[in-house]
Amino acid sequence: MSKTWQQRILRVLKALKLERFFIGDGPSRKPVTLTNRSVYILPTREGIIFVLVLLTMLLAAFNYRNSLLFMLTFLLTGLGLVAMLHTWRNLVGLTFQAGRVSPVFAGEIARFQVQLNNAAQRARLNLQLHPDEHGENVQTVIADQPGNNTALLDLPCPAAQRGLLDLGRFTISTRFPLGLFRAWSYLDLNMQAVIYPRPGKPSSLPPAETGRTRGNAQAGEGMDDFKSLREYIPQDSPRHVHWKASARGQGMLTKKFAGEGSVERWLNWDSLANLGIEARLSQLCRWVLDADKAGERYGLRLPGIEIAPAQGEKHLYHCLQSLALYHVKHR
């Protein structure tokens, strides 16, 4: 459906004051509490069959003037009305708040953390949360929430490409207790996930640029002082591999010496001129991960962006985020 038609439909819904029934109240960064006006309820297919059966029983009771059948019909009607009330009350009063969203790589599953608070004494059972804007095959999260309790729920959404992934609107619904009615509400907590580029195929890191070394690292200063062991990567020199550990079945490990990591390696966009934009970002992502794994100091150059050489988790996050958001428009 084109945006023009979407805008026309929204204008019609607003004119009829029905937009909240179909699309909710729109994005909100604040905690959202479900109220009487924001929870809707309709009979399910089983509920419609139940009503038709009651009407048939009522007609039969009138036709045969059977008081026992009248009593059974009214008893089941009362049961249905009580079930409808409990279905509606199962949602009213719940509070939802945006939680943490961890970055992932393209092709993985992004998990949006939603905080659910039930301030009432009664438990809320058979709650179903479903992201509406990520296709029908997205997993529905089902949860039971005890009274006076707060829980964190993860809404999984596939991350097909790098950039910013919007959770968008999601539906909270329930069919508790009998499945005769479905109550629901729409929520949009304005949540986004940062999606890193899909790492490219393993390849050798680019060589350190001339004049980009620190101290006398190239001369081997400090290389005689053993520091620790780290996991082996293909770029490591064979003479630094801990072959005894490998022979003992401990896997490939590399010896790390004091003075290592002093080489400043630049990961440069221009060195991948034969690749397209996304392929360049994927390869740079692979180099960033490999350089961090090797414990090296590395810097990143993108068009209009230069990140000075450094190490550590914060530097890794900064580089990966720059790759993820390269030429991406923010919401």
Image (spheres, rainbow, N blue to C red):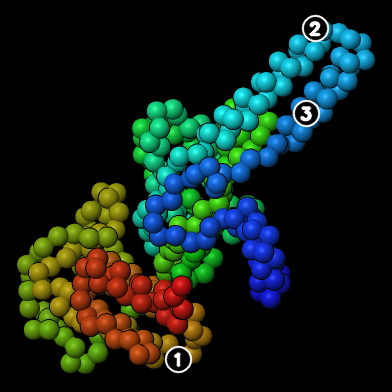
Secondary element under disc 2, as helix, strand or loop, is helix
Q: Residue 180 vs residue 243: left or right?
A: right
Residue displayed at 28% across by 63% down: 232
Mark 1–mark 3 Cα distance, whole angstroms, equals 69 Å
Kind of residue sitting beneath label 3: Val
Residue 300 image point, x, y percent: 30, 82
**Residue 57 falls in which quadrant of the image?**
top right
Q: Which residue is mark 2?
A: 68
Between tags 3 and 2, which lies in front? Answer: 2
Secondary element under disc 1, as helix, strand or loop, is loop
Q: Residue 245 vs residue 105: left or right?
A: left
Query: Closest to the observer: 308 or 241?
Result: 308
Residue displayed at 64% across by 63% down: 14
Mark 3–mark 2 Cα distance, whole angstroms, equals 19 Å
**Residue 152 falls in which quadrant of the image?**
top left
In the displayed structure, 71 sits above or below 264; it is: above
Q: Are marks 3 and 2 in contact (CB under 8 Å)?
A: no
**Mark 3 or 2, nearer chain start:** 3
Kind of residue sitting beneath label 1: Ala
**Badge 3, how many Cα within 10 Å: few under 14, some, many 20+?**
some
Residue 166 image point, x, y percent: 49, 64
**Badge 2, how many Cα within 10 Å: few under 14, some, many 20+?**
few
**The disc label shown at residue 273, or none:** 1
Residue displayed at 44% across by 67% down: 195
Residue 269 image point, x, y percent: 38, 87
Q: Are marks 1 and 3 in contact (CB under 8 Å)?
A: no
In the displayed structure, 183 sits above or below 243; it is: above
Residue 129 image point, x, y percent: 53, 45
Secondary element under disc 3, as helix, strand or loop, is helix
